Image: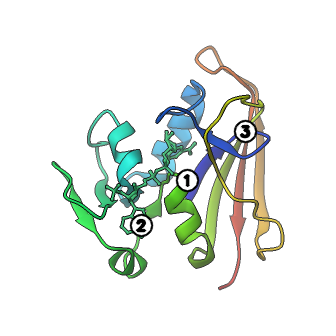
Amino acid sequence: MIVACDRNGAIGKDGDLPWRQSTDLKHFKQVTMGSNLIMGRKTWDSLPGILPGRTHYVLSRGEVEGVEVITFEQALNMEGWIIGGGEIYKLFLEHVSELHRTIIDARVSDADTHFPDITGLGFTLTEEKHVVAGEKDQHDMVFQHWNRNL
Ligand SMILES: NC(=O)c1ccc[n+]([C@@H]2O[C@H](COP(=O)([O-])OP(=O)(O)OC[C@H]3O[C@@H](n4cnc5c(N)ncnc54)[C@H](OP(=O)(O)O)[C@@H]3O)[C@@H](O)[C@H]2O)c1
């Protein structure tokens, strides 16, 4: 699973990310390149299109044009990164052993989508890197890598 959230766990606003954070998008690309991406239909709608070098799978109860739709059960039996959004993170959190979480050093005031609190779920922080905002970032950020045995 991979997510970027603010200091309060906010991840989305009006169907989009609440920040412009180029360094985090590069990090996302580096982690996910060559893998399957598993996402909710609303996150699919928020993407500019297919992200190169990755195979996209979307959870939906309907039909979605231009991408393969899978069920929750199918997704559980696949290798890949769960990339959101809020509904899909909640659904899969108890099933994942690895989490890349970027903490965006901000507090979005009017976010409408959040990532769950992972306290007490058995994750251990195995790596943490603080990064100062670059020219194309709105905020400083912390890249965290969490693992647990399921
Ligand atoms: N900061 C981050 O790292 C990050 C990452 C990803 C997304 N986001 C943000 O999160 C927001 C979107 O999140 P969201 O919670 O609104 O939507 P979402 O989780 O992306 O998608 C929800 C949709 O997934 C489908 N779905 C949910 N549960 C399902 C199930 N059990 N079986 C089959 N399909 C299922 C449904 O699609 P249908 O309605 O088609 O049936 C549902 O409407 C956006 O603002 C986006 O920018 C942020």
Q: Is residue 109 above or below residue 1?
A: above
Residue placed under numbered mark 1 in the picture: 86
Image coordinates for residue 147, horizontal then vertical, percent: 69, 70
Residue placed under numbered mark 2 in the picture: 80
Cα–Cα gap, marks 1 and 2? 17 Å
In this figure, what is the number of numbered marks? 3
Left or right: 135 in relation to 78: right
Image coordinates for residue 29, horizontal then vertical, percent: 46, 43
Q: Which element type, helix, strand or loop, lies under badge 1? A: helix
**Pointers 3 and 2 in contact (C-beta within 8 Å):** no
Q: Earlier in the sequence, mark 1 or mark 2?
A: 2
Find residue 6 and name its label.
3
Image coordinates for residue 76, horizontal then vertical, percent: 42, 79
Q: Amino acid at mark 2?
A: Gly
The residue that appears at 24% across and 60% down in the rendered structure is 62
Q: Amino acid at mark 3?
A: Asp
The image quadrant that residue 59 belongs to is bottom left
Image coordinates for residue 145, horizontal then vertical, percent: 69, 58
The residue that appears at 49% across and 54% down in the rendered structure is 84
**Pointers 1 and 2 in contact (C-beta within 8 Å):** no
Q: Residues within 10 Å of mark 1 (few under 14, many from 20)?
A: many
Q: Does mark 2's beta carbon lie closer than 8 Å to ligand 1?
A: no
The image quadrant that residue 117 belongs to is bottom right
